[in-house]
Image (spheres, helix red, strand yellow):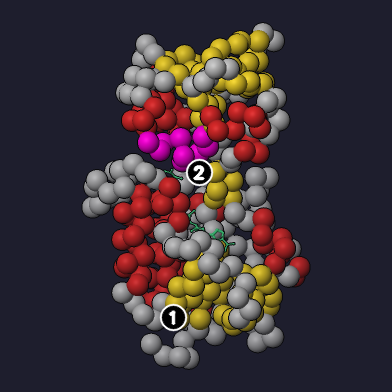
């Protein structure tokens, strides 16, 4: 590859960022990927179950799939993958393109930036206001960690907070292991129809909607939880564990600290913080692109992230032809 080829800086080494890296490399551009974690691969490292949604990769767990993505990119020595590294400053360069300051002190010059930082699961902040939470912390699990070691908790009484696909999937796995499950849903049931029907049909399951976790206390080896229901009633029951599945939020807040004002003002975020990008992955800031879950509220998954990475690479290559 020519050292004269324009360089693209990808922020985030999950499926979207790695897919874009491969495509950009194959299209003849120089690529550097910045990944904040010690290993690339993204959120699939937290998917402890088989991911049967990726064509041609049946039976692989999330971490196995992530390793394959990383290994494929690693076959190309020209793709520079910097783990444990985040951008600390992004500014317009004098000749166009960008200057990117890195957490290790290096200053990169690049012709384009692709944001592929994905999302993160909501954790303790969602129950911080629940009375008594701090004293019961060890009986709570959050997000992906509610799917860990499920056989170990077979037969237990589990309170699930959440009403989306993840909450219902968690219920399904627990019910299959003889657990007694209560789902407390704050506003509306948002899970896929098939998943909801499967869970609702199970005798060991109770669904309360709307219901809000008000307070918790530890009893003798159990947790006593009070749920506030629609009628203003308080429902008090004993559980062994509480699983919180309160959705995801985009990793975009760091941009407000490190992107210089001129660029930041042309980036558009929705109310939840997702960065807006068009179907070709272009944002409001010329030369700044976005792909994957960080800008995809509608259908975040591995396959859409891989496809968006490829699309972003194509758009970048087209736009850089003129420089
Ligand atoms: C438990 C769980 C199970 C799932 N199961 C499935 C499934 O079965 N099938 C399916 O298709 N999808 C599944 N998903 C969703 C899938 O993992 C995501 O849709 C996909 O990983 C999105 O890819 P991405 O590259 O957009 O983002 P991510 O995978 O989130 O990758 C983003 C990367 O950016 C990095 N990053 C963040 N901020 C910065 C920063 N400031 N600087 C540098 N790097 C940064 C992160 O560390 C991360 O590595 C699951 C997700 C979870 C959590």
Closer to the camera in the image, 291 or 281: 291
Residue 112, picture quadrant: bottom right
Q: Quadrant of the N terminus?
A: bottom left
Asked if 270 appears above or below 188 in the picture, the reply is: below
Closer to the camera in the image, 175 or 313: 175
Q: Is residue 244 visible?
A: no
Task: Give x and y (percent) for residue 93.
Answer: 67, 82
Closer to the camera in the image, 112 or 108: 108
Q: Is residue 39 left or right of residue 213?
A: left
Asked if 212 appears above or below 267 in the picture, the reply is: above
Q: Residues within 10 Å of mark 1 (few under 14, many from 20)?
A: many
The residue positioned 67% from the left and 55% from the top of the image is 253
Residue under label 1: 29
Task: Give x and y (percent) for residue 75.
Answer: 31, 74
The residue positioned 35% from the left and 24% from the top of the image is 154
Q: Is residue 287 left or right of residue 302?
A: right
Residue 277, picture quadrant: bottom right
Q: Which residues are magenta?
A: 141-149
Closer to the camera in the image, 294 or 156: 156
Q: Is residue 104 left or right of residue 221?
A: right
The kind of secondary structure element at disc 1 is loop
* The furthest residue to the right: 261
Q: Residues within 10 Å of mark 2 (few under 14, many from 20)?
A: few
Label 2–label 1 contact, CB within 8 A? no
Task: Give x and y (percent) for residue 4.
Answer: 48, 91
Asked if 70 appears above or below 224 in the picture, the reply is: below
Q: Is residue 54 visible?
A: yes
The residue positioned 45% from the left and 59% from the top of the image is 14
Residue under label 2: 298
Find out whether residue 74 is within the magenta segment: no
Q: Quadrant of the C terminus?
A: bottom right
Task: Give x and y (percent) for residue 130.
Answer: 68, 27
């Amino acid at each position: 590859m020519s050292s004269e080829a324009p360089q693209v800086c990808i922020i985030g080494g999950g499926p979207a960022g790695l897919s874009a890296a491969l495509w950009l490399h194959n299209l003849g551009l120089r690529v550097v990927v910045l990944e904040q974690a010690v290993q690339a691969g993204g959120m699939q490292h937290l998917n402890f179950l088989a991911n049967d949604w990726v064509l041609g990769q049946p039976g692989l767990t999330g971490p196995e799939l992530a390793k394959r993505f990383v290994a494929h990119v690693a076959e190309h020595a020209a793709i520079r993958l910097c783990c444990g590294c985040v951008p600390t400053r992004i500014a317009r360069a004098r000749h166009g393109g960008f200057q990117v300051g890195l957490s290790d002190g290096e200053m990169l010059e690049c012709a384009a930036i692709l944001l592929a930082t994905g999302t993160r699961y909501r954790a303790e902040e969602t129950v911080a206001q629940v009375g008594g939470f701090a004293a019961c912390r060890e009986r709570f699990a959050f997000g992906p960690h509610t799917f860990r070691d499920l056989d170990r908790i077979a037969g237990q009484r589990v309170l699930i907070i959440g009403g989306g696909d993840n909450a219902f999937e968690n219920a399904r796995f627990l019910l299959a292991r003889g657990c007694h499950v209560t789902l407390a849903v704050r506003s509306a049931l948002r899970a896929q129809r098939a998943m909801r029907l499967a869970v609702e049909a199970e005798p060991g399951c109770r669904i309360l909607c709307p219901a809000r976790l008000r307070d918790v206390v530890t009893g003798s080896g159990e947790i006593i939880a009070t749920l506030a229901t629609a009628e203003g009633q308080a429902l008090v029951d004993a559980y062994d564990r509480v699983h919180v599945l309160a959705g995801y939020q985009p990793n975009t807040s760091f941009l407000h600290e490190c992107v210089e004002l001129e660029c930041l003002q042309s980036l558009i975020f929705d109310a939840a913080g997702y960065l807006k990008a068009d179907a070709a992955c272009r944002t409001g800031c010329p030369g700044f692109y976005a792909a994957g879950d960080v800008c995809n509220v509608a259908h975040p998954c591995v396959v859409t992230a891989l496809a968006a990475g490829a699309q972003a690479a194509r758009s970048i290559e087209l736009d850089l032809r003129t420089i």
